[in-house]
Image (cartoon, rainbow, N blue to C red):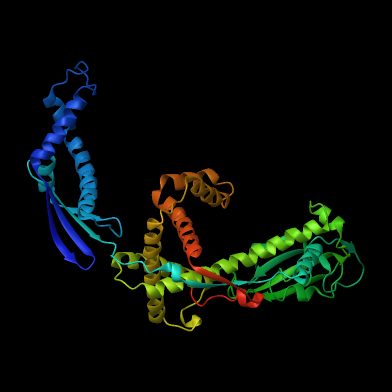
Amino acid sequence: MKVTETLNEGLKREITVTIPSADMTAKRDERLVDLKDKVKINGFRPGKVPMSHVSKMYGKSVMGELVNELIDEHTKAVLAERKEKAAQQPSISMTEDEAEAEKIIDGQQDFEFKISYEVIPPFEVADFKKLKIERPIVDVSDDEINEQIERIAESNNTYETKKGKAADKDQITMDYLGKIDGEPFDGGADQGAKLVLGSNTFIPGFEEQLIGQKAGDELEVKVKFPEEYSAEHLAGKDAVFEVTVHEVGKPGKVAIDDKLAEGLGLENLDKLKEVVKGQVESQYGSHTRQKVKRQLLDQLDEQHQFDLPEGMVEQEFNNIWTQITGDLEQAGKSFEDEDTTEDKAKEDYMKLAKRRVRLGLVLAEIGEDAKVEVSESELQTALMEQVRQYPGQEQEVYDFFRKNPDAIGGLRAPLFEEKVVDHILEKATVKDKVVTKEELMKEDELPV
């Protein structure tokens, strides 16, 4: 085998590999000999098929298999010999001339192919033990817990039929039929629907028009779907709902006591408070994690500057851009609606793509040095979480991931990243800082 470097510019490499035809035919003949004792051909006893016949029937297919195997084998060998890590799957090119390809398959010409790739750039990981992280936390007060329990009580409220007009907080039982330009639309009708006035669960402006109505009333409710409505074919459209009110219910008063907790499957009110506190702390904890991770990544980004593989950056940018433009299209918006231009947006998201690639390489290096691994049980748990998101299609989703290494890699990558972040936080200096709920919930300007 002959290996020749034909390009070495920056992070780009091109290597030409030449395998002599004699080596190819030797490997082919070795396999044909093994195949001779296994094949069954009419007119010949097992193991008695002439080599010339075996070669005529299977020579080209065996050589084709050898070509694919040798490409994979020698690509790995070349990278190992050069002690290089390819940033992405190397690109392989070979002759497209049919006559030449036929000669290679027939063992009459040396097999030559080119490996093109970008290398992972060499860089030195900064001392992340010197990172200083401020962890924002919110103290969960008794007032907040009691407020959450009051909401639970309201959601478990009962309603007693009342005579007279509906008021705020009352429950309406109704039939409705929605129309746009006089024509009914999918999802715009229901019978016996219950709606608590003031809950803001229907389209803006709908509930207000039901205040003052009573059982037996029929009316038209005129509304406009929000511009950002999830169903694109309804967004921004004027609609008329034909409504028949069947019943008006007055809310009762649910006592906040042990009985309420028991109705929720808990021992007593103290246990309910404990559960609610845990839920609130968990919600705040996820936001705290986001803030801490953002600080960590920001500092790592500032500490590392090195050339990036163009292919990785381009792929990351394309992924981001596809999502952004898709979201805009679904919302029926333009870049101008977002107070920017397409060129400025591309510039900003290219910076984000470079940041993500750079941080991905840094975290990968840290994780490799620390021998961070994602266990099969962790991966299986993540897979099951994905499967549960598609009720009725569990087996199809499971099979999809199991048959697609890239999809499994997509599950493994975020798990690996979070474990590396945990490893860094164990070494860094982290101090808690009590903040308000509003400060914790404030969104960062750019996604991580």
Residue 319 appears in the picture as rendered:
yes
Q: Is residue 167 above or below residue 104?
A: below
Residue 215 in which image quadrant = bottom right
Is 182 left or right of 162, judged from the image as shown?
A: left
Report x, y in % for residue 111.
12, 46
Identify the residue shown where x is 69% and y is 61%. Answer: 279
Residue 158 falls in image quadrant: bottom right
For residue 377, above or below residue 333: above
Q: Position of residue 87 (x, y in %)?
A: 30, 60
- Quadrant assignment, res 214: bottom right
Residue sitting nearer the eye, 243 or 109:
109
The answer to whether 23 appears left or right of 123 in the picture is left
For the residue pair 354 and 91, the one nearer the viewer reads as 354
- In the picture, measured across the screen, residue 110 lies left or right of residue 217, that is left
Residue 218 shown left or right of residue 103 in the figure:
right
**Relative to the observer, which residue lies in front, 347 or 128?**
128
* Between 141 and 90, the one nearer to me in the picture: 141
Taking 20 as reference, is 143 above or below it?
below
Q: Residue at x 52, y 72 (%)?
A: 133
Q: Position of residue 193 (x, y in %)?
A: 76, 61
Instruction: Name the outermost residue toward the top.
Output: 45
Residue 325 appears in the picture as rendered = no
Question: For the point 14% across and 30% down, which residue is it?
Answer: 55
**Total count of labels:** 0
Question: Can you say whether 181 is above or below 114 in the image?
Answer: below
Point out residue 20 in the picture as x, y percentages from the top left corner.
9, 43
